[in-house]
Image (spheres, rainbow, N blue to C red):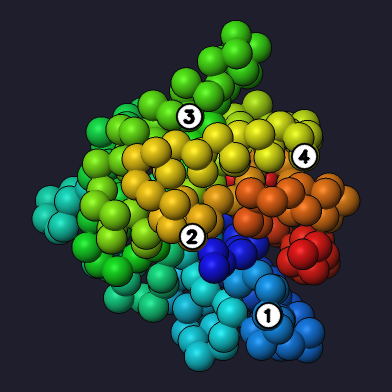
Amino acid sequence: MRKKIVAGNWKMNLKLEEGMQLSSEIVEFVKNNHLETLAGKPGVVMFTPFVHLTSVADFTAGIKGVEVGAQNCYTEEKGAFTGEVSAEMIESTGATHVLVGHSERRSFFGETDEVLAKKTEIALKHALTPVFCCGEVLDERNAEKHFEVVKKQLHKGLFWLSEEEFSKVVIAYEPVWAIGTGVTASPAQAQEMHAFIRQIIREKYNDKTADDTTILYGGSCNAKNAAELFANEDVDGGLIGGASLKAEDFCTIIKSF
Ligand code: PEP
């Protein structure tokens, strides 16, 4: 059975002490509600800035149901790449996940499908779970090209993986027009795209792989709309930006399953 996940993408927010405070409130919530032991409840992943990783990973070590991830990694193993952070370094902090291809990386930092394929490869090599982001911009949706766009992103970024490698990947469908805008995809729009993604995984791999792949929704998901998004058969949780920065909102989203 596929895993449910509620993940917070802190982006470039929170000083270290603020991040530690937020982590401790989330951990308290998970413990107090016994979420780590309740069947059907989601795992929580916090995608922190690089500088928070070691502290948050140390703090959450051994706590079931709470994991930590980086928001990016570099394509190469090591060397003269000033300012970059490798998958091996991320792994060494105790983090277990890494975002690959967030739309902000694609648009502000020019990350191409080819670069993202390399990042996926190196993340898997270092036992990190890549959370691979895909999604169309508004013009593409208005032109009814959204299925084509997402299919191409998945083909180039992921579908060259073996079945075994692919089974370690999580997908996040994040329509770019919904990220940070307050405009959320409707539950029907989210379900339609998630079902499409699962279908193309089925065609490329097989039934088991498709049924076991966790597909998250991201884009202005918040404490008010999470329950109706997560109620959809093919929506296995969320990648949450703005609403992951306040413990109360994020914990309400975790409770939405
Ligand atoms: C994100 O950055 O992945 C995201 C979904 O942001 P927001 O929830 O703020 O739209």
Q: Which residue is mark 4?
A: 187
Quarter of the figure with the C terminus: bottom right
Report the Cα–Cα distance between label 4 and label 2.
21 Å
What residue lies at 68% left-to-right and 80% top-to-bottom?
A: 39
Question: 35 or 2, which lies in front?
Answer: 2
Q: Residues within 10 Å of mark 4 (few under 14, many from 20)?
A: some
Upstream in the sequence, badge 3 or badge 2?
A: 3
Residue type of the residue flagged with mark 3: Val
Q: Position of residue 222 (x, y in %)?
A: 79, 50
Viewport quadrant of the N terminus: bottom right
User: Mark 1 sits on what residue?
Assistant: 39
Q: Residue 67, percent across and down?
A: 52, 74
The answer to whether 64 appears left or right of 158 in the picture is: right
On the image, numbered disc 3 is attached to which residue? 150
Report the residue marked by disc 2: 212
Residue 196: x %, y % from top left: 55, 35
